[in-house]
Image (cartoon, rainbow, N blue to C red):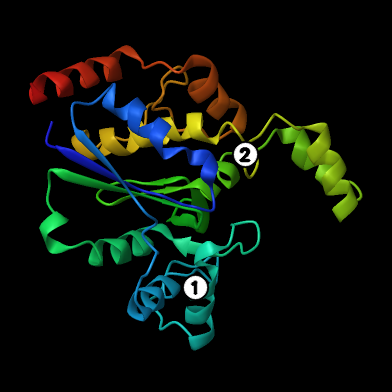
Amino acid sequence: MKTRKIILYNEPTVPEIQLKTLEKFLTEIFPVEIEIRENFFLDSTDNFFEKIASTRIFDLKKQFEKHNASIENIQIEKENKDMSAQEEMTLYDGFEFQNTIAEFIPMNENVKDTLHIIFTNKLTCTFDENDFRYHARALIGSNPSIISTTGMIEAPAKPKQYYLDLMINFSKNRIKEINKKYKGEFLEYHDSRISEITKGYLLQAIIYYETGEAFCEHKDCRLFNAHWQKDLFFSQLENKKFCKKHQDILIELKNQSQ
C-alpha cells in the first residue's frame, strides 16, 4: 500500500460528517496514519478564492472553458465559505476544482504516500460526452480526492415516482408535500445518515488512489457507484460489505503494508 498517511479536511457546514467517527472507521481497515484538519477554505488567500471562482460552471451543456472570475464571484466565494449548500447552489467543474486545490497543498505534503481527502459542500460536476451535459458527482478521485456532501444528496436520483409527482401541479407547496410523502427514501441536507454513507465514498477514494479503480459494478459491494438513492442506501446502509474481488484487494493492501 503506497499510502502511509491520510489527511481528512473538515466541512464545518456539514457536522453530520462526524470526522472522528470516520477516523476510527479508517484506522480499523487501513494500517495508515489518519490526520484531521480544519476546512481547506479556512484563512485562504484572495488568490485561492479567485481560482475557485474560476472553476464555476455557467452552461450545463458545454464543456468547461477557462475564464477569469469576476470580482463579484470572488467576493461571493469569500463570503460563502461558511454558508450551507442549500443557501447557494453553484456548480463547479470537478477536475478544475480538484486541480485548484492541488495547487495550494504545500510541496512537502504533495507526496505519493500522503493522500489528501477534501470534504466540501460545493457541488462538483463532470462533463459527460455521451449526453453532452454536466452531471453532479459525489467523488472526484485521485490526490487530492474531493468528496462533495452536496453531491451525495443531488447526484444519485430519487425514486422515479417522485419526479412524476413533481410534474403535476408544480409549486413550492407541492414540493414540500412530495418531499414529505417520500421522506426517508432519499438523502436530505443535515441527514443523520450522511456519516455512514460517507464511509463508502472514503473507501472509493482510497481504493481509487491505490488501484486506479474507484467503483464496483455489483450493488452488494460498498464500492458500488450508485446512480439511485435506493441503491446508495442498500450498498452503504443495509449491506455495508465488499464483494469478493474488493475484499481480496483490501487484504492484499493490508499485507503490503506489513
Asked whether residue 131 appears in the rendered view, the answer is no
Q: Nearer the viewer, residue 33 or 63?
A: 33
Give residue 57's position: percent from left, percent from top: 50, 68
Q: Quadrant of residue 223?
A: top left
Residue at the image point whose x is 39% and y is 35% from the top = 20
Specify the amino acid type for callout 1.
Glu
Q: Quadrant of the N terminus?
A: top left
Which image quarter: residue 33? top left
- The local secondary structure at tag 2 comes to loop
Q: Which residue is mark 1?
A: 77
Q: Which mark is residue 157?
A: 2
Q: Crowding near pointer 2: few (<14 within 10 Å), some, many (20+)?
A: some
Q: Please tell me which residue lies in front, 50 or 84.
A: 84
Residue situated in front as seen by the camera: 251 or 84: 84
The spot of residue 80 in percent (x, y) is: 54, 68
Cα separation between marks 1 and 2: 28 Å
Question: Which residue is painted at 12% across and 47% down in the image?
Answer: 112
As drawn, 63 above or below 218: below
Amino acid of disc 2: Ala
Q: Residue furthest top?
A: 244
Count of numbered badges drawn on the protein: 2
Query: Which element is circle 1 on?
Result: helix
Q: Classify 41 as above or below 177.
A: below
